Image: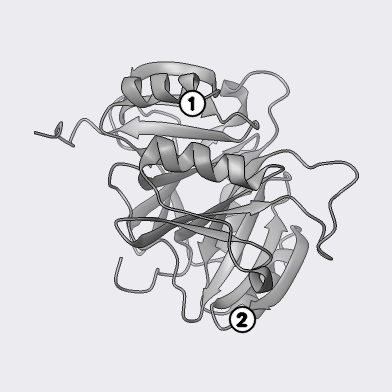
Amino acid sequence: MNVPYKPGTPCWIDLMAPDQQAAIDFYCDLFGWQGEVGPEETGGYAVCTLKGRPVAGIMKAMNPDGTVPDLMPPTMWTTYLSTDDIESTVKSVTEAHGTVMMGPADVMDLGRMAVIADPAGAVVGLWQAGTFGGAGIVNEHGALIWNELVTGDLPAASAFYSAILPVSTARSEMPGGEGYVEFKVAGRAVGGMMDLAAMPPGVPPHWQPYFHVDSVDDIQAAAVRAGASVLAPAFDMAAGRMAVLADPQGGAFSLIKSPTQEDPA
């Protein structure tokens, strides 16, 4: 990615985990990333890279004042949606009955961020780029390829995100993808949305990242050897072969290989 992400497009992901170094080690070993705990002025935030390009952030779970929480929050990946006017977007979140959890706030000269929850409770970040635009490489082995909202009310979610950002939603036309909804920016699918009813009981509304891999089965096996849990073992579906895993600290993520992407030579 060498140009700015269009508003409404998922542009970055980061993970908050109790043991930051263990999380860095797990994902770097699994996907071939490079990463280390960042400088003190950024709270130790680690920007992990692939082929020298930023792909994801990993941070230690902490309170806004830098102290360790008494009750550790669940380990989770956060998706960030691009905006070119974060103040206006945050204002529209409140008007559309969402919740502003943090921000807007400056992140040095890198950009401005906020964290919100949609009316169903799914947490998502907002990012207005400064010197940092977001993920510098996508759709390759070990990199982000898709972001998906799981929610219990698809029409309500469609209305909310369309109200706060220039996105539209449409039912997928992919054979076998009946009932799946796509987020679109300027007519191009940039993310998806599925019904919470398809999830096991107790799963809350959430955003989930998908990483492209050359072999879902091989990466699943490697993740398990490293202490991950399998939430949905490798299976074939309309968009390719995928699996859903939880890292050793409980952070959920998906693997996928599209049938249009050839095996490496």
Of mark 1 and mark 2, the one earlier in the sequence is 2
Q: Nearer the viewer, residue 115 or 32?
A: 32
Q: Please say if 95 is above or below 116.
A: below
Residue type, mark 1 in image = Val
Identify the colour scheme used.
one colour
Q: Are marks 1 and 2 in contact (CB under 8 Å)?
A: no
Residue at 17% across, 35% down: 260
Residue at image location 32% in from the left, 58% down from the top = 137
Give the CA separation, mark 1 to mark 2. Answer: 35 Å
Residue 112, image x, y percentages: 61, 76
**Image quarter for residue 150?**
top right
Where residue 194 appears, as percent x and y from the top left, is 52, 34
Q: Secondary structure at mark 1?
A: strand
Left/right of residue 42 with respect to residue 265 in the rendered view: right
- Which residue position holds label 1? 244
The correct choice, above or below, for 67 with respect to 29 in the image is below
Q: Residue at x 45, y 16 (%)?
A: 233
Q: Nearer the viewer, residue 171 or 194?
A: 194
Q: Residues within 10 Å of mark 2 (few under 14, many from 20)?
A: few
